Image (cartoon, rainbow, N blue to C red):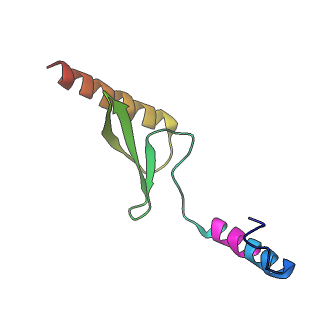
Amino acid sequence: MEKILSDWTPKEIEALKRATDRLKVAQPKTSPQSIKGVYYNEERDFYSVYVFAGGKKIYAGRVMELDEDRIDRLKAKARATYERIAKS
C-alpha cells in the first residue's frame, strides 16, 4: 500500500486512514466468518442459513439473530430432509 501512496503526504495518508476507520464502523452487520453457510441479507436484515449436502447448496432457513444452536438445528433438519428425498 505504501507504494501506491508514495506521492501522498503523511497528512493525507492519516486522513485516509481516519476516513477508512469511520467507514468500517458505519458498515452494517456482515456475514459471520466463523459460521459456514450463514449469509447476512442487508436489505431485509436477517441471516440466511444454507447447508452443503451432496455437492449442493441447500436453503435451510433464516434467523433474525445469530443463535448458533438454532442455526445448527436448521442445518440438521435440512440435511435430514435432503437425505430422505435423495433416498427416494
- Seen from the viewer's position, the closer of residues 20 and 47 is 20
Residue 21 inside the magenta-drawn segment: yes
Q: Residue furthest right?
A: 10
| Quarter of the figure with the C terminus | top left
- Seen from the viewer's position, the closer of residues 3 and 40 is 3
Q: Left of 35 or right of it: where is 19?
A: right
* Residue in the picture at 57% in, 40% down: 34
* Residue in the picture at 76% in, 67% down: 3
Relative to 66, say whether 84 is above or below: above
* Residue in the picture at 53% in, 56% down: 30
Segment tinted magenta in the rendering: 18-24
| Quarter of the figure with the N terminus | bottom right
Residue 27: image location, x then y, percent: 58, 66
- Seen from the viewer's position, the closer of residues 10 and 83 is 10
Q: Which of the 4 image quadrants contains residue 40?
A: bottom left
- Count of picture labels: 0
Q: Left of 24 or right of it: where is 3?
A: right
Q: Left of 85 or right of it: where is 59?
A: right
* Residue in the picture at 38% in, 32% down: 75
Residue 29: image location, x then y, percent: 54, 58
